[in-house]
Image: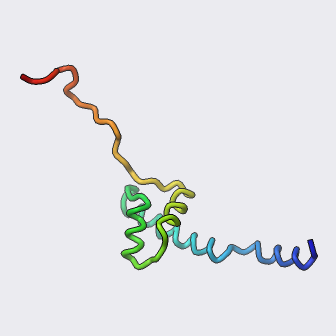
Amino acid sequence: MAPSTCYYRRAHLSQPSRRREADRVLLERITAIWVESRFTYGSPRVHAQLSREGIRVSHKRVERLMRQVGLKSAYRSRYYRSLRTGRGRPG
């Protein structure tokens, strides 16, 4: 590797890229929306809220950022347990 390349990389890789900086700012807003929803919003609702606020971003980017920091939506249990077990059918 040429010495000029080495100095260039050392100088430029120490700073975050524009995309990484934009992701950091966007993630702050995503986290704020998620907290305001009391931890219930998933990526589709967060993306919709960002759109309403005029922030243009793809849904895949929102999904990626939420996945990276572990933000998940609340969801209901898949199974329903009846309190009337063992009674059979009325009639």
Q: Where is the N terminus found, in terms of image quarters?
A: bottom right
Residue at (67, 75) in percent of width and height? 17
Percent from the top left, x then y, of residue 26?
52, 71
Percent from the top left, x then y, of residue 48?
38, 68
Query: Does residue 84 sit above or below 77 in this rendering?
Result: above
Residue at (51, 60) in percent of width and height? 66
Q: Nearer the viewer, residue 4 or 89?
A: 89
| Residue 47 located left or right of residue 60 | left
Residue at (77, 77) in percent of width and height? 12
Query: Does residue 79 sit above or below 27 in this rendering?
Result: above
Q: Where is the C terminus found, in terms of image quarters?
A: top left
| Residue 22 located left or right of residue 45 | right
- Residue most toward the left? 91
Percent from the top left, x then y, of residue 87?
17, 21
Residue at (41, 58) in percent of width and height? 42
Residue 9 falls in which quadrant of the image? bottom right
Query: Does residue 30 sit above or below 2 in this rendering?
Result: above
Specify how the rendered protein is coloured.
rainbow
Image mark count? 0
